[in-house]
Amino acid sequence: MQSIMNVLSKALPVFVVLALGVLVRKKKMISRAGISDMKSFVVNITLPFVMFSAFAKAEYTINAIITPLVIFASCVIMLLLGHVGCRVLKTGGKLSPYLATGFEAGMLGYALFALLFPDEKTAAFALIDLGQVLFVFTVYKALLAGRGNLKSVVMEAVKAPTVWGIALGLIFGATGLFEKLTPSGVSGVLDSIASFIAAPTSAVILLTIGYDLAPGEINWKKTGKLALVRIAVSFVVLGAVILIDRFVLGSMMHLGALVLMFTLPPPYVLPVFADVETERADISSALSALTLVSIVLFMLLTVIFR
């Protein structure tokens, strides 16, 4: 009975808030513009504080260097496998292979990790996320934007509040400054401010995702191939990373955080790079379908990691 209640305590909040998002859309309580503003609020204000807190309190050992590098390499391999998979299944579209790589950690991963492991430090997930953040803001966006637009990609990364949150967190954490300020109480004040601002992140993110979820509008036959490539590639690469972590790295990664990361959908920004409206619709439908898959897999993880 206790195990069941433990699973429900992790899974139900997700489904309740997602359902509220669907209800909000159907009842027209919040406009589409309002939802966009809520997403902007999370990405530009609350999420950077989540990042800062996670990296400021992280333990900087060899793990902090190797883990991001392994995930970065994994994302590159996933992109290459995505190209292969899309050719085999003849999915068509220039952006199709990009669905096979990258993870929507910011708008979904941190919210789910906090629910799945409420008593553990976010830093375990943040270190894994750092590798894919570096990939998304370098290789991923540079390739999507085109070789001649590299400067704009770099400028976008420099201006991104989440990147600043990570950078400041790394400065405070890696230099030991956060720990040194603990006796004076300054670290406690900074932690309280960051925690207070970051608090609504999970609920707001899940509400906006619920608002956008419309399974009945997804062309499942057309997006099935795209989703299949993503799922297959994620499964293969996750298995390889787990083996490397266990037998080569000595299990230095947080297994739950690693598995959760690979169940996440691709970055939600991908449809922005579509030049053709039909491809934009296909990519958006695939992202919606993969988000539903992620929620189902999260439910499974609540049982596995209860």
Image: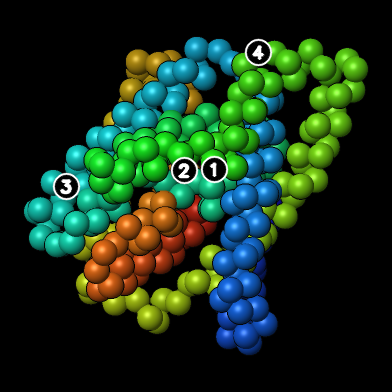
Q: CA distance from mark 4 to mark 3?
A: 40 Å
Q: Nearer the viewer, mark 2 or mark 4?
A: 2
Badge 1 density bin: few <14, some 14–19, many ≥20, Cα 10 Å = some
Residue 156 disc label: 2
Q: Which residue occupies the extreme right position in the image? A: 184
Amino acid type at circle 3 is: His
Q: Is residue 100 visible?
A: no
Q: Quadrant of the C terminus?
A: top right
Q: CA distance from mark 2 to mark 4?
A: 26 Å
Dot 4 or dot 3, earlier in sequence = 3
* 206 over 117 or under it: above or below: below
Residue 160 disc label: 1
Circle 4/circle 1 CB separation < 8 Å: no
Q: Secondary structure at mark 4?
A: loop
Q: Quadrant of residue 265?
A: bottom left
Residue beneath label 3, please? 83
Query: Residue 11 appears at what percent x and percent y?
Result: 60, 58
